Amino acid sequence: MSPASPRWLSDLARQLPIRSQFVVSGNIRDSFLVPMAPGPTLAPLLRAAWETLRPLGYAFFLVFDTADGLRVYPNEDGPRALAERLFDLKLCEGCQMVSLETLTQVMKNLAAQRETRCALVVDFASRLTRHPDHLAEGEHRFFVAAEKLSLHATPVVPRDPGGSPLFNPVLWLVNRSQDLPSWFTLDSERVASLVIARPDFETRDATARQLAPLFAGYATAPEEKREVFVKAFANGTQGMTLSALSDITELASRQDLGIAHIEDAVRSFKVGALDNPWRRDYLRQRIRDAQAFIEDRVKGQRPAVVKTLDILKRSVMGMTGAQARAGTSRPRGVLFFAGPTGVGKTELAKTLTHLVFGDERAYLRFDMSEFAEEHASARLLGAPPGYIGFDAGGELTNAVREKPFSVVLFDEIEKAHPGILDKFLQILEDGRLTDGRGETTYFSETILVFTSNLGIFVEDAQGSRVQNVRPGDSYATVESKVRGAIGDYFKFRLSRPEILNRIGDNIVVFNFITPEVAERIFDGMLRNVARRVSDELQLKLGMPAQVRAALLERCTRDLANGGRGIGNELESAFINPLSRALFDQDLTGRSRVSVTALQEHEQVVSLSLVLA
């Protein structure tokens, strides 16, 4: 079955009897699948409009832009000679530079033309003025004349009997409708707006069928595999233009990617890399053996580690979103790490990065407390078109475009402005985001990690902040209460349950640090201190059991701040006094230092040392 004509072309043809001018905006630089002989063909906008208007009796288009001036389409002897005679043109080398005053006369002649049907296409109309609502005098006269003409023009009655009267229209091609003066389209009923949307699934499906024979292996593939290929092509290019589908086809041809590798071709177009870390042979073995590796760095969080690995294995197997009817371009994985401070949420994100990509430099971190104000979204995601800095893009979009294979951490997500959180809906659902420059960034190869302390403290009936879960509570209690608080926050406080719905069951709750785990963390930190003393000072650090026990008790007496709190106390009660004591010693020829006692006087901790 041949595809139908694009909707904007049908609307154009349908409104020609009643509208004299059309502002065409949106996806104007795309290709369009147009019914033609011998079959549907991908054509640029001008060709698509011509194939629609030519059967209605139109003889040619006059096309104007500020770079090349005025020309005739199609560029053939007959239409060009007719246009030169009717409009008194001298098209040297196919075009003629004209001023806005001359273009005004061309529009008037077009509207009054009775010998033939023709149309004027003002291309790159977004570039006619620098500021559409602050026009220079000549620009203002031009648009007033165009508005007046739109109201006074009359349809052209054809010479052949039986035809219906149609306008000789003016088509303004703009990126956005606001690129023209706002009053121009609002104050004239004869000016119609046609917004060209990105192609829907049916259009992409039909285009994929047109392009499919150009892929290696399609001609000899059985019908079943052909259908799988077409569906994968159409699904994988959601939100993309038909021109992008053509470019993917060209890319696949140059890189020898056949129908079995359509996902690689689409990914290569999106992120600019054919190599896919997610499909490396060693990754599955690395993840299979990862639990011990992770638990060595993130201690005492086995339930969180197991659930994180489950989500990671799902991502590696390409099963993310498998329950949906069609494939999507969602991120490879989405994780929402919740729980007390200092228990390993950020450390687990770093460990994931090292595990998957072998390099923590693929880890992108954004502290969401820096985006507490709504205007900060311009910094993160890029300013809207027309605002200062819109051409610079956003910190997030630029970073992911530079490192498409990465773990992206949004730390303390609850501190971001709710308006910024709305932007994550598109990323979570479609796996892409368009910045102020109009460039699309794809998140389909990233793992998104959100961290939050939601649920540890809540507000009581009086609005006071009270602790919701405490050290010593069972993990089941902590998980239940934290999950409930997160749900309440998104559903009732923010009134954005859709964000929580996009995250789904990917909430990973971390437990408080237990005394046993705290001791393991303490010992690990103490070993790090000893290693640093050895590396920097060439001294072997030692201490008797009673000193270690006193230091352990001091560092782990309050576990509310988790491992970070242990580290802070160790720094205050041991590293600082150790540095102070060693600073005053002559270490020449020394190879060992022993801490023999720990004292505190007037809240100042000091150590007794023996050097050997």
Image (cartoon, rainbow, N blue to C red):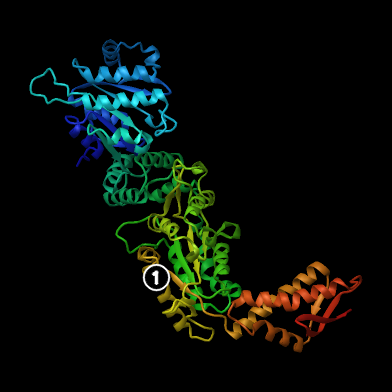
Q: Where 446 sits versus 104, above or below?
A: below
Q: Which amino acid does label 1 sit on?
A: Asp
Instruction: Quickly name the residue at label 1.
Output: 505
Q: Quadrant of residue 327?
A: bottom left
Q: Residue at x 11, y 24 (%)?
A: 163
Res. 42 in view: no
Q: Residue at x 30, y 35 (%)?
A: 24
Q: Where 154 sits versus 565, above or below?
A: above
The residue nearer to you, when weighing 255 against 397, is 397
Res. 242 in view: yes
Percent x, y of residue 204: 30, 45
Q: What is the crowding at mark 1: few (fewer than 14 residues within 10 Å), some, or many (at least 20)?
A: few
Percent x, y of residue 347: 58, 68
Quadrant, the C terminus: bottom right
Q: Where 610 sits versus 75, above or below?
A: below
Residue located farthest toward the bottom when viewing the structure as drawn:
546
Q: On the rendered structure, is 156 left or right of 22?
A: left
Q: Residue at x 57, y 84 (%)?
A: 514
